[in-house]
Image (cartoon, grey):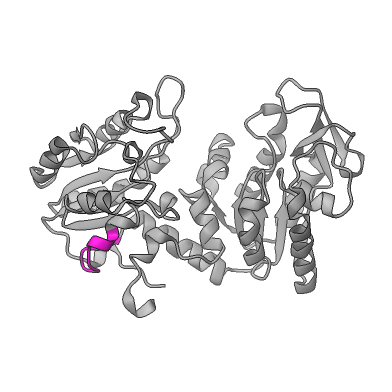
Amino acid sequence: MKLQEIKNIDITGKRVFIRCDFNVPMDEYNNITDDRRIRSALSTIRYCIDNDCSVILASHFGRPKGGFEEEFSLQPIAKRLHTLLKQEIKMAPSIICDETMKMAKELKAGEILLLENMRFESGETKNDEALSAKLASMAEVYINDAFGVSHRAHSSVEGIAKYFDMQHKAAGFLMAKEIKFFHHIVHNPKRPFISIVGGSKVSGKLEALHNLVPKVDKIIIGGGMAFTFLKALGHEIGNSLVEEDLIPEAVKIMEQAKKLGVKLYLPVDVVAAEAFSAEAIAKIVTIQEIPKGWMGLDIGPASALLFSEALEDANTILWNGPMGVYEMDKFAKGSTKISHAVANSFATTVVGGGDTADLVRITGDEDEMTFISTGGGASLELIEGKILPGVKALVLEEDN
């Protein structure tokens, strides 16, 4: 897959529309708690500024119900961009109102305009053509640098790209880096290649699991999704999270792994609790002894040790999904131990966005990872072998 990249098109002096992913976590006081996604977009923005472009930035933030909502405004993002870029960021009053269109039209070389939250426009998530056309009319060049949302067919991601030819649209530096990294990891990894898959549900990761099994040497399954596999093996799992309808699929995945000689690891013990609560009474039990009515909320110490030992000979590690309810201290030990094991390995380590990226930041292992993706859902779909809607429009003809 050959992507059209920003460095290969002429952007000098042009008005450039960059779709970014500034969907960053905030605390209750509207302070940005992790600005990694904003910092990741800076190289593309600076490259445009250095080439005398006028820059229009677009992003979504959270899930507003409809229309303007103060708590979902991009004002704090504008403030952080101002701090990081050390230049004025013009804040648009909305997305496509007359005043915003006028501001976009009058932008001078080197100036930056940030549009309001894309999701304030109901047409954004519906991939509305009229909205796409209006957004496209703001600029001469379209750059997609929002890997984290490129699995969504939205107006500012997929729809807008239809209005630009291949010499006037491209992937930004971050997007190109993400795509190349995952493509290489999945298709040409240095072996042994080990995948760690966690998180709460099998359903969201089913296709990825099917696609990973023939490619990896070992697969480690933890988190809530492990209980569907444990139930499939006949274990009593109490009130632990389980997707009954996916038990046959779990069996299929285990059979596929066995047939291909892929070592599949499941927890051997868990931290079980009476309820899903930080205050609940909890104890470490083997998976054969989960009390009826109790639920497993983290992998136990023996599982953490087993998984860590399985990782010792890895040359490539791909990790997507925590091992337990890491947001609660009581159930964060398993995820923390695995994070440290991955960070301390000599392997190429790739962390698939979302919760896993948040987890390695909390554990302090962020700097030890080779690559942290900015997109959880998008990275999963790439692993599934799909071409993302936001990427498809940027693939050069000869490779289509």
Q: Residue furthest bottom?
A: 398
Q: Residue at x 71, y 24 (%)?
A: 277
From the top left corner, tell me how far across and down residue 35 is, in percent: 40, 36
Q: Is residue 211 above or below residue 112?
A: below
> Is 129 covered by the magenta stretch?
no
From the top left corner, tell me how far across and down residue 104 is, in percent: 14, 43
The C terminus - image quarter? bottom left
Residue placed most toward the observer, 361 or 399: 399
Q: Is residue 371 left or right of residue 313?
A: left
> Is 163 covered by the magenta stretch?
yes
Q: Is residue 345 visible?
A: no
From the top left corner, tell me how far across and down residue 356 is, in percent: 57, 44
Q: Is residue 51 above or below residue 33?
A: below
State which quadrant residue 300 falls in. Answer: top right
Q: Residue at x 41, y 60 (%)?
A: 389
Q: Residue at x 73, y 47 (%)?
A: 243
Residue placed most toward the observer, 330 or 241: 241
Q: Is residue 3 above or below residue 134?
A: below
Residue placed most toward the observer, 113 or 83: 113
* Range drawn in magenta: 161-170
State which quadrant residue 336 falls in. Answer: top right
